[in-house]
Amino acid sequence: MDVVVQPGVNWVTLNRTIQDSGLFLPLDPSPTATVGGMVSTNCSGTNAFRYGTMKDWVVNLTVVLADGRVIKTRRRPRKNSAGYNLTSLFVGAEGTLGVVTEATLKLAVAPRDTGVAVVSFPTIDEAARAAARLIRSGIQLGALEFMDEVQMRVVNRHGSEAVKKTTWDESPSLFLKFAGTTDGIKADIAQVRDIVQPFKPRKIFFARDKQEEADLWAARKEALWTMTSIKPKGYSLWSTDVAVPISRLAEIITLSKEDSGKLGLFASVIGHVGDGNFHQAVMYDPKDEAQRASVAKCVHDMMSRALEMEGTVSECLVEELGNDAIDFMKTLKQSVDPKWIMNPGKVFDLPAGSKASAAR
Amino acid sequence: MDVVVQPGVNWVTLNRTIQDSGLFLPLDPSPTATVGGMVSTNCSGTNAFRYGTMKDWVVNLTVVLADGRVIKTRRRPRKNSAGYNLTSLFVGAEGTLGVVTEATLKLAVAPRDTGVAVVSFPTIDEAARAAARLIRSGIQLGALEFMDEVQMRVVNRHGSEAVKKTTWDESPSLFLKFAGTTDGIKADIAQVRDIVQPFKPRKIFFARDKQEEADLWAARKEALWTMTSIKPKGYSLWSTDVAVPISRLAEIITLSKEDSGKLGLFASVIGHVGDGNFHQAVMYDPKDEAQRASVAKCVHDMMSRALEMEGTVSECLVEELGNDAIDFMKTLKQSVDPKWIMNPGKVFDLPAGSKASAAR
């Protein structure tokens, strides 16, 4: 139930190659992603709600260190507590501690059947509360995603042909994936109907066949692409990456939308609700100084708010963890790569006066 | 869906305290374990097959470093890829990188219903092949444990009153836990019957009520205790902790049993099959030099065999990972604890001539 691959292997190719085994690597990042990149960024995706992130699927890594030595972080068996967890240290380190040259990946048993549903709600608050209730229900959802009314409108008007077959309700919506046995999924769907009822769903679609499943899910998958495609020439898209505890998700999304609305910015929200993670995509004209300032203020306020809510913001490492934790990380980095030759400038800025820094 | 606790909190007490929330910390180590110990050893247990090990349930840690600074390894949200994964570095480090003073733990939704089954097989090979088939079936088992015929005989003769209510088949047996909805479990049990059939099961028990469930599972939980209780006065028990890829499990258990049999040693085997991990408990008289030598040989051979099978052995860090990986770990340790004051001698021997080493 594992596979040994080199870092240049594309995950879609891998899954196609091992299809007959009934197993798969259950991550779902961009279709162009390779194993090396997925390891180095600890990649996530819409399947993370059920299957976690890349770190949960790496058994061991072969790594070339800064001094040229080659190590294997651990052996194959799943249970292993020998020494420090080097595997998790290299996953997400963006190549700053060593170069990954091979990975043993754990595989999951492919579900026998799948299903997709889309449920729209009158408000973000109701959608978020329904999501929290779904998470707490114990139903094993494969994915739980959110799109706001702006994003739904964009999908309706500018989606692909497949996506436009459906007339989407232009209100805050949850996208659900089911996975399991056919009977199990039927039971799950019945439960979902009951659970969302108190939150006044406006419309509930359940895909009736595999084609409809693919079409419904495509609306979620092409969301960012549709935003990019409607962007006027010369305009930019600022996409944030913020996570907060699930209980605070409705609040931060609502406040951030109010902010961008007040500033007259066109913005849509997509969320990986199960992880408390969301992206706000804000459109602006970079040549318009006032608009640029508005976007910067809007993004900055959202980040401060997320940090106040004990959240995390991928752009603000120091504010989030504090200087002492960053110093600790830098001490580790310095000890195993004293010349800072491993992907210099990534994760941390180069230390002032370092050789690599001077060489730049 | 998370909880903040201090390291002295006992996990049984924690789960009892939060019972009404419908959530629980799904690890299952010794009932006496505390969160601090569970974090520092990256504890496992019979639930690991479904829920993983402690590292999968730690959101962040507050740690006092060797220089007295206090850091928090990350913030609350589940999705987080900011900087290095310090949380996973401290989990399993046995206090050698810092003192854990607080932990935020992720909680799981408690299953609505549970079930227990015990299936016995003619041979270890058939039990192991049935186990592999069960794992690959995609049925969401809560636990999948193995006990050999020796251990089953010990349970029959020396188990507690609860366990003796059942007449156990004295042959290699699998212990299965189910978790989910009542209907879901019924469907799972029907599937298990079909899956094990080709492997000629000798006896299949399914617990008919909660009491029987507790009684059946008690046989697994008290296995090590029964071995200890029948040990003649003055005798010792050597319990090994070995993991191999699941495909090699039947082979290594069979060979190890042959070895101990040939050497005239009384030994039983318990395995966490889902993880490829097993313990062989060997009884011997430490005053009998020849027997001591036999046990040492038997254990040594099993470990070499496990390492040949790309396995892992908790006692042989260097043989398993190689000197370069160990050096890398020591470099990290040295950089953040230059005086080796954090739990000196654990994980690694003290460096020769170090201050802490001299002080001993």
Image: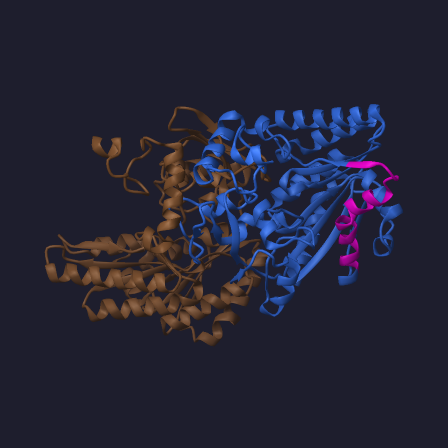
Chain colours: A brown, B blue
Judge left or right: residue A220 versus residue B219. left
Residue B180 occupies quadrant: bottom right
Q: Is residue A340 above or below residue A25?
A: above
Rendered view: B26 above or below A153: above
Residue A79 x %, y %: 60, 40
Query: B37 left or right of B331?
Result: right
Q: Nearer the viewer, residue B211 or A16?
A: B211
* Residue B215 covered by magenta stretch: yes
Q: Which residues are magenta?
A: B212-237
Q: Residue at x 28, y 42 (%)?
A: A349
Quadrant containing the C terminus of chain B is top right
Q: Nearer the viewer, residue B46 or A141?
A: B46
* Residue A41 visible: no
Any part of residue B141 in sight: yes
In the rendered image, residue A353, in percent from the top left (x then y), is placed at 24, 35
Where residue B259 sits: x, y (%)?
78, 25
Depicted B165 relative to depicted A355: above or below: below
Above or below A166: residue A262: below
| Closer to the camera in the image, B267 or B143 | B267
Count of number-bearing discs: 0
For the point 40% across and 34% down, the residue is A335
Task: Say whether residue A166 is magenta.
Answer: no
